[in-house]
Image: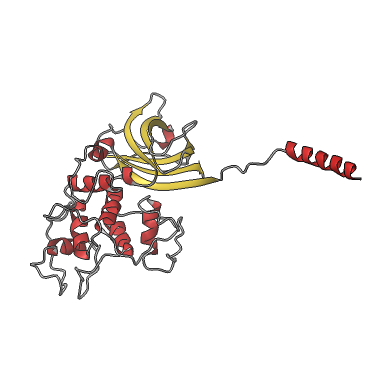
Amino acid sequence: MKKAFKSLLMAVLAIILFIPVAVPSAATFEGSLSGKSTSMDEQANYEAAASTSFRDVPSTYWAKKEIDYLVKNGIIQGYKNGNFGIKDPVTRAQAAIIVARALGIDDEYAPNPGFRDVPTTHSAYNEIAVLTKYGIFSKGTYFKPNDKLTRAQMAKIITESFGLDYKSTTSFKDVKSSDWFYKYVQALAYNGITKGDSKGYFLPYQPLTRTEFAVFMARTLNEQFRSGVQATVTGTQLLSDGRLKMNVQLFNNTKNEVFNIKGKYELYINGKLVAKSTSLREYKNVVLKPNEKRTVEFYFSPSEVKQNIKFNSSAELFFEHQWYYYQ
């Protein structure tokens, strides 16, 4: 009996040992992003940004490139003591100064908005007045210039200042569709300017540090800082068959290798629509590693070409991208 049981056990083990073990494959996820980019002449500002030497911003600091970019372009400054103030909170007045500089309207005239706590002698008076003139800040009795700027307020200011579009594509655990800031947060997420924290929260009521605000501003002004698969147009050529060939530099600002990349584009030169694709089209055999850049070609059909204008540094590209990645 024992011998028979032993033989049976050996047979069962043999079968088990030869059964292939099913290894779970990595899950496939889809990413998407819409945005706007300028020509490479403008993007070169990022590449040429001079390195700053703030005492509290070491070369390995996670936001150094963004800070360098804003300082180089005269949008933000450090303190007289040589520090940037990486952990200091941003006030509403400071945010007004930074945004007005980024828009190039800080020296523009504006009527007195009438805030009781912002006299004409206030250091941020003109910037607050100009942004109020354009409706970015609402008129009221008090502006509260020394209050800390929250992430929700930041989302509204950036969205309205730069005219960001949005779609309801991102779900944050602490942002409901009924919240006053919902569409502004969605605009930042839709354009690759924010993705929330690792747990799926946006933290709308949390005050921003100078570093965090610098990162949001850099992402708004320059697509190379944004998350997702970005694109920049580097040149165009009208072909003899009526198609328009567009050279596009794709860059992967994600932590994953991406593939099956699809693009849909609207190209403007001198403010005029040059070409507009009607559907998402896949870049065949294009795989991008994290932080990898690659120049590819995209072809507009003759019916998608609206007019032929010589490519120049005024070129703007509105894009929609979809891609897949493993995780």
How is the rendered protein coloured? secondary structure
Residue 143 to residue 213: above or below: below
**Residue 298, position as x, y percentages in the image:** 41, 32
* Image-based side of 254 in relation to 69, left or right: right
* Image-based side of 198 in relation to 9, left or right: left
Say which residue appears at 52% left-offset and 46% top-offset: 29
Say which residue appears at 16% left-offset and 72% top-offset: 115
**Residue 97, position as x, y percentages in the image:** 18, 58
Q: Nearer the viewer, residue 259 or 21?
A: 21
Q: Residue furthest top?
A: 240
Q: Quadrant of residue 107?
A: bottom left
Q: Nearer the viewer, residue 264 or 197?
A: 197
Say which residue appears at 20% left-offset and 41% top-offset: 51
User: How many marks on residues?
Assistant: 0
Q: Nearer the viewer, residue 202 or 134?
A: 202
Q: Residue furthest right?
A: 1
Q: Quadrant of the N terminus?
A: top right
**Residue 240, position as x, y percentages in the image:** 39, 23
Residue 108 to residue 174: above or below: above
Residue 301 to residue 316: above or below: above
Residue 149 to residue 66: above or below: below
Q: Residue furthest left?
A: 121
**Residue 327, position as x, y percentages in the image:** 51, 45
* Image-based side of 228 in relation to 128, left or right: right
